[in-house]
Image (tube, coloured by chain):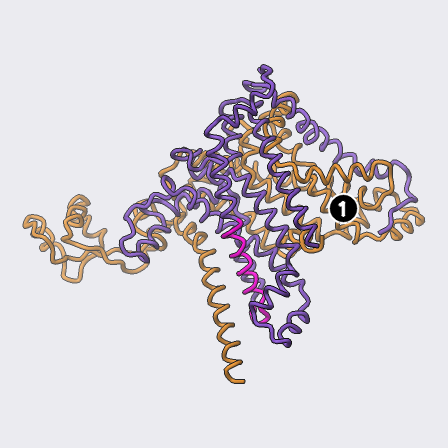
C-alpha cells in the first residue's frame, strides 16, 4: 500500500473538498451546536432560555424516559438473543455443501430487509389485526381455544414489534453470517471430520472461531440498530401506543423535540443516547481486541 | 456404510424442508399483501388470500319458523351462490339466517370478479390523494442523493486512500470517529441549522445533509487501498493524463462493484427514510412515499385495500432494483465486515 507522491499539491484537497464542506456544515457544526443546545430549553428553533444542566436532570427524572429505556432494552435484547441465533442457523443450513439453490434462498430471506420500516409497519399493522389479521387467523387454526380477538397492538406491543423485526432482520443478518461461513477454508472442516469431530464439535472448535470477527460485527450492528428503533412502533401504533408500551428512546426524543418543540431537551436526550452507544462500541472493541 | 449415507441423505432432506418452511414464512406476508390489495372491499374481510365464490347451504339448526320458511322456498338442496341468495331474499335476511345458524357458507371456485385493480387505479388517478406525485418525489430525492453521495464519497475515499498530504491522518480519524455518531443525535441541531439556513420544507434541506455520509468515505477508502495500484496512477500522469480524467476514466471503473453497491444502499436508505422528510418537509405535495403512506394510514385507516396497494407500489421499485443488482449489493454490504 503505497501513496502517490507525484501529484500536484492541490489534487487531494480538490477531491476531498465536496465531502469535507458538506460534512463540516451538516455533521460537525450540528454536533458541536447540540452541546450548547442541550443547555437550553427551547420552543421551536427561535426561542430558548438557558437552563444549564436541567435538561439532563429532567430527562433522568421523567418516568417516560425510563419506560423508553426499558422498552428499548427489551427490544434490543430480543434482537440479539432471538434474531441472531436464527440468522446463524439459517446461514449454517444454507452453507451445507449439499444444498443447492443457495442464491435463490438467500434472495428470498434477504428480501424483507428491502422493505422500508414504514411499509413494514403498515403491513404488520394489518397482519397482526385482532380479528381479521392473518397471524391470529393462523393461531386460531393451530391452537385450540385461541381467543377470537387477540390484541397484539394494544396489550402485546413488544412481542408484536419483535415478530415484525424477525421478519425484517433474520435474513439480513444471515447474509453476513453466510458470507463469513463461505470464507472458511473447507479443508479445515474436512480435517476436523477426519479427526472424528462430530457436528457440534466442528461448530464449536472450527466454525465459531472462524466467524467470530463477523459475528462480533453483526452483534454490534444489531445492538446499535435496535437501540435506535423508531419508525416501526411509531407507525404501527400511531405513536407510543397504549400506556407507552411502544415508547422507545428515539421516539421519546422525537416527541419532545418535534411534538413539544423543545429542541434543547431533544439534544440532551440525543447526547444521552449517543454516549450510551459510544460506550457500547468501546466495550465491544475492548472485548473483540482481547480475543484476537 | 449404508446407514452413513442414509443419515447424510436424510439430513440433507431435513435442511431443504427447514429452508423451504422458512422461505414460505418469509414470503407469506408479501403474498398476503398482494391479495389484500386485489380483493374487492365487499369481500375483503371474508378471506385472507384468494376470494372464493360462496355458497349458501341450509343447516339443521334452531327453529325460526318464519325464516326457515323463507329459505325452504328459495334454497335448492345443493345450495346456491350467496349473491343469488342475497338478490332473492335481501342481505338482512341472509345475515340473520347466518347469525341464527340456519345457513352456512361454503367456499367454491375462485371468484375472479371479486378481484380488481381498483385500488391501484384510485391511487394513480390521484384525485383523492397525490400518490403519483409522492412517487416522483421519492424517485427524485433518492436518485439525486444516491448519485451525489456516491460521487463525493468516492472522491473523498480516493483522496484519503491514495494521496500523501498534510491533513490525511487527521481527516481519516475524523471520518472514523463520525462512524459512531448516531443519526438521532443530529435531529434537533440539524433541524435548527436548516431553519437558520432557510432550508426547511425544501428538497435542499433534505438532500444536502445526506450527501456526506462518513460511512461511504470509509467504504471507498477501504476498497481503493487495495484495488487501485499507485504505480498505475503515476504512469498515467507521465503519459500526460490529467488528474480529473484519471479519476473518472481509470479509478472509478476499478471500484465499479463498490460504486454499484453504494449507489443502491444510499438509494434504498433515502427511499425508506421516514424521519428525515417527516421533520424537514411540511407541504404535503413535497412528501416522498414513506411520509405519504404514513399519512394515508392516518386518513384511510379503514380502507385496508388502498393502504396495501400503496404499500405494494412503494416497495416494488426497490425490489426490482435489487433483483437487477443483487450480487453487487450483497458483496458491497458484506465487504466491510468480512474483509475488514
Q: Residue at x 15, y 52 (%)?
A: B101
Above or below, comparing residue A10 to residue B60 in the picture: above
From where the camera sits, is residue B120 visible?
A: no
Is residue B190 found left or right of B227 in the rendered image?
A: left
Q: Residue at x 30, y 60 (%)?
A: B109
| Residues shaded magenta | A80-100
What is the x, y in percent for residue B138? 57, 38
What is the x, y in percent for residue B268? 59, 44
From where the camera sits, is residue A38 visible?
A: yes
Q: Residue furthest right?
A: B238
What is the x, y in percent for residue B129? 45, 34
Q: Residue furthest left?
A: B65
Choose between A240 and A64: the one closer to the eye.
A64
What is the x, y in percent for residue A100? 56, 69
Q: Which residue is mark 1?
A: B221
Task: Report the predominant secondary structure element of the magenta stretch.
Answer: helix
| Chain label for disc 1 | B
Choose between A209 and B65: the one closer to the eye.
A209
Q: How many marks?
A: 1
Q: Kindly indicate the quadrant of the structure image that contains residue A33.
A: top right
Q: Kindly indicate the quadrant of the structure image that contains residue B185.
A: top right
Q: Secondary structure at mark 1?
A: helix
Q: Residue furthest front?
A: A290
Q: Residue at x 60, y 68 (%)?
A: A202
Residue B27 lies in magenta, yes or no?
no
- Specify the chain shown as purple: A
Choose between B7 and B254: the one closer to the eye.
B7
Write down the colour of chain B: orange
Is residue A120 found left or right of A142 in the rendered image?
A: right
Choose between B115 and B7: the one closer to the eye.
B7
Amino acid at each position: 500500500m503505497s501513496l502517490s507522491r507525484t501529484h500536484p499539491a492541490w489534487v487531494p484537497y480538490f477531491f476531498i473538498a465536496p465531502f469535507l464542506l458538506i460534512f463540516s456544515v451538516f455533521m460537525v457544526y450540528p454536533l458541536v451546536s447540540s452541546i450548547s443546545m442541550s443547555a437550553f430549553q427551547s420552543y421551536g428553533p427561535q426561542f430558548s432560555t438557558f437552563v444549564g444542566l436541567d435538561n439532563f436532570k429532567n430527562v433522568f427524572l421523567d418516568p417516560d424516559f425510563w419506560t423508553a429505556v426499558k422498552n428499548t432494552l427489551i427490544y434490543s435484547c430480543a434482537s440479539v438473543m432471538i434474531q441472531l441465533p436464527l440468522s446463524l442457523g439459517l446461514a449454517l443450513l444454507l452453507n451445507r455443501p449439499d444444498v443447492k439453490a443457495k442464491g435463490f434462498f438467500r434472495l428470498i430471506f434477504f428480501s424483507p430487509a428491502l422493505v422500508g420500516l414504514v411499509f413494514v409497519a403498515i403491513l404488520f399493522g394489518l397482519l397482526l389485526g385482532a380479528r381479521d389479521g392473518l397471524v391470529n387467523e393462523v393461531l386460531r387454526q393451530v391452537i385450540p381455544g385461541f381467543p377470537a380477538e387477540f390484541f397484539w397492538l394494544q396489550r402485546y406491543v413488544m412481542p408484536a414489534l419483535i415478530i415484525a423485526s424477525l421478519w425484517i432482520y433474520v435474513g439480513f443478518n444471515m447474509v453476513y453470517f453466510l458470507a463469513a461461513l463461505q470464507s472458511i477454508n473447507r479443508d479445515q472442516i474436512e480435517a476436523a471430520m477426519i479427526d472424528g469431530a462430530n457436528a457440534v464439535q466442528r461448530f464449536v472448535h472450527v466454525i465459531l472461531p472462524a466467524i467470530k470477527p463477523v459475528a462480533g460485527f453483526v452483534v454490534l450492528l444489531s445492538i446499535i440498530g435496535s437501540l435506535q428503533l423508531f419508525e416501526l412502533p411509531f407507525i404501527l401504533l400511531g405513536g407510543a401506543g397504549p400506556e407507552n408500551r411502544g415508547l422507545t428512546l428515539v421516539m421519546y426524543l422525537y416527541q419532545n423535540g418535534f411534538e413539544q418543540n423543545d429542541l434543547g431537551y431533544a439534544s440532551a436526550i440525543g447526547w444521552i443516547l449517543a454516549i450510551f452507544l459510544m460506550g457500547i462500541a468501546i466495550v465491544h472493541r475492548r472485548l473483540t481486541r482481547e480475543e484476537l | 456404510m449404508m446407514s452413513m449415507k442414509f443419515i447424510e441423505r436424510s439430513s440433507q432432506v431435513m435442511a431443504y424442508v427447514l429452508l423451504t418452511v422458512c422461505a414460505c414464512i418469509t414470503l407469506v406476508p408479501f403474498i398476503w399483501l398482494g391479495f389484500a390489495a386485489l380483493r374487492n372491499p365487499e369481500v375483503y374481510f371474508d378471506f385472507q388470500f384468494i376470494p372464493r365464490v360462496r355458497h349458501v347451504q341450509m343447516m339443521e339448526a334452531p327453529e325460526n319458523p318464519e325464516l326457515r320458511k323463507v329459505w325452504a322456498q328459495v334454497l335448492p338442496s345443493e345450495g346456491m351462490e350467496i349473491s343469488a341468495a342475497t338478490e332473492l331474499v335481501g342481505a338482512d335476511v341472509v345475515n340473520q339466517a347466518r347469525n341464527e345458524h340456519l345457513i352456512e357458507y361454503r367456499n367454491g371456485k375462485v371468484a375472479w370478479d371479486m378481484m380488481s385493480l381498483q385500488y391501484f387505479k384510485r391511487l394513480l388517478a390521484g384525485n383523492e390523494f397525490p400518490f403519483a406525485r409522492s412517487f416522483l418525489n421519492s424517485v427524485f430525492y433518492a436518485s439525486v442523493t444516491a448519485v451525489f453521495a456516491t460521487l463525493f464519497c468516492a472522491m473523498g475515499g480516493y483522496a484519503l486512500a491514495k494521496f500523501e498530504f498534510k491533513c490525511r491522518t487527521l481527516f481519516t480519524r475524523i471520518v472514523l470517529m463520525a462512524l459512531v455518531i448516531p443519526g438521532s443525535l443530529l435531529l434537533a441541531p440539524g433541524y435548527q441549522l436548516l431553519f437558520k439556513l432557510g432550508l426547511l420544507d425544501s428538497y435542499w434541506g433534505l438532500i444536502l445533509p445526506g450527501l456526506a455520509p462518513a460511512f461511504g468515505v470509509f467504504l471507498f477508502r477501504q476498497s481503493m487501498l487495495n484495488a487501485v495500484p499507485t504505480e498505475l496512477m503515476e504512469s498515467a500522469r507521465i503519459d500526460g493524463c490529467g488528474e480529473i480524467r484519471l479519476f473518472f476514466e481509470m479509478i472509478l471503473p476499478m471500484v465499479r462493484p463498490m460504486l454499484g453497491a453504494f449507489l443502491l444502499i444510499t438509494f434504498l436508505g433515502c427511499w425508506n427514510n421516514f424521519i428525515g422528510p417527516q421533520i424537514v418537509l411540511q407541504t404535503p405535495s413535497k412528501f416522498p412515499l414513506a411520509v405519504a403512506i404514513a399519512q394515508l394510514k392516518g386518513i384511510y385507516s379503514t380502507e385496508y385495500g388502498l393502504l396495501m396497494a400503496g404499500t405494494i407500489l412503494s416497495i416494488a421499485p426497490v425490489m426490482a432494483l435489487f433483483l437487477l443488482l443483487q450480487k453487487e449489493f450483497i458483496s458491497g454490504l458484506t465487504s466491510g465486515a468480512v474483509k475488514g
